[in-house]
Image: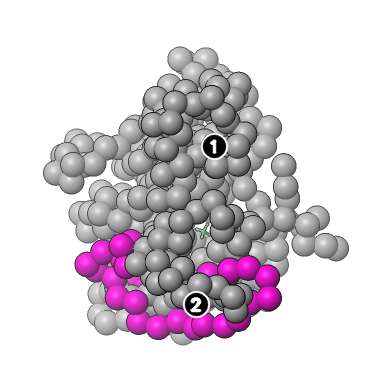
Amino acid sequence: MKVRELGEFNLIARISEITGQEKGRVVLGIGDDASLLSSRPGFHIVTTTDMLIEGIHFLRERIPFRDLGYKSLAVNVSDLAAMGAVPLQAFVSIGLPGDTDVREVEAFYEGIMEAAGNLLQVSGGDTVSSPAGWAVSITVIGEVRKDRELRRDAARAGESLYLCGHVGDSAAGLSVILGRVTSLDAKIADFLVEAHNRPVPQIEVGMALAERGISRCAIDISDGLLQDLGHVCRASGVGAAVHLDRLPLTQEMRAAAAAHGVDPHQWPLTGGEDYSLLFTVAPGRERELDRMIGELGAEAAHIGEITGGEEITLFLEGERRPLPGTGGYDHFRKG
Ligand code: ADP
Ligand code: MG
């Protein structure tokens, strides 16, 4: 069987059968946004890795190198946010064609440092030549207090479902970059392209949720809201009800959807690379959450509830809506 037929997520399931169950000090292995390793008393080391390939994740001539560096690190930091972890250090490996201009590599690292902020140290990596385009592989390490980590398998029926950060902007931005949406006001187009090239990981919110124990369950939206919520539901053995009219959508994304002739919920539900944070909150903790979000100067939308069963149901103004046909990004299944 070809990997194309199996699909990305079934392939990862096969790999995880071969690599086996957690052992030794590994508390959580394959299957979440990051792994957990028992470390100093009361804490876990949190590790995550992501790879970006030219032609798949980015088009070299369409993204400034500084933005490429920024985004490559930001998507990894987003996985730490989804565990509630504090970022500590990063390892950055790059594959480059020999005729790459040194200035491009420097700009890439300036972007890396911008996304690293004050917390994260770049402590190593690897540099190799590549026959066909850039490849970037980044590993990020963080730390979270034991039993405070935000896991995909910790959602329980009756909890409220929240989303921090917008959804759909990145997919709309990609359509602008690819020239599929034209006739947009330049300001709107720039806003959406920036959302695609420079996603903002919700690291402070993730850390605060874990520290204060307000949430036990989170995932970052890398493959579209439906697919990532589906991962939470499958891992936790729960369902979810999502109210489409409560989704945090920007005017810019709505304008692009209208110009492109797609339903305004299509990109938020099935587009990818928003890197907003989806999390659950136990009944009775909502006011504490509101206070925390206010203190951080952030915004969080209460988009639905975790339910029994294993189904995701969508509502628009109280009426049930069918799930859209395509279900988010899979590296081997196109379309
Ligand atoms: P995310 O979108 O949050 O980065 P992925 O969907 O890429 O997560 O990965 C899901 C899980 O599968 C993660 O725990 C990841 O570490 C693991 N995984 C993905 N590919 C491999 C692989 N080739 N070998 C081992 N584990 C993998
Ligand atoms: Mg993730």
Frontmost of labels 2 and 1 is 1
In this picture, residue 81 sits left or right of residue 258: left
* Residue that mark 1 sits on: 176
Q: Is residue 269 visible?
A: no
Disc with the residue nearer the chain's start (2 vs 1): 2
Above-or-below relation of 283 to 113 = above
Point out residue 272 in the picture as x, y percentages from the top left corner: 54, 45
List x then y, in percent, for residue 180.
62, 34
| Residue at left offset 22%, top offset 58% | 211
- Per the image, label 2 sits on a secondary structure element best described as strand
Some atom of ligand 1 lies within 8 Å of the CB belonging to the residue at label 2: no
Residue under pointer 2: 93
Q: Quadrant of the C terminus?
A: top right
Q: Quadrant of residue 88?
A: bottom left
Q: Which quadrant holds the N terminus?
A: bottom right
Say which element carries label 1. Answer: helix
| Residue 199 circle label | none
At label 2, the amino acid type is Ser
Name which residue lies at 41% across and 44% down: 194
* Magenta range: 113-142
| Vertical arrangement, residue 130 with respect to residue 334, above or below | below
Label 1 amino acid? Val
Q: Residue at x 66, y 55 (%)?
A: 331
Crowding at mark 1 (Cα within 10 Å: few <14, some 14-19, many 20+): many
Task: Give the CA separation, mark 2 to mark 1.
Answer: 29 Å
Q: Is residue 119 magenta?
A: yes
Frontmost residue, 36 versus 188: 188
For the view shown, which residue lies furthest in the right direction?
1
Determine the image quadrant of residue 282: top left
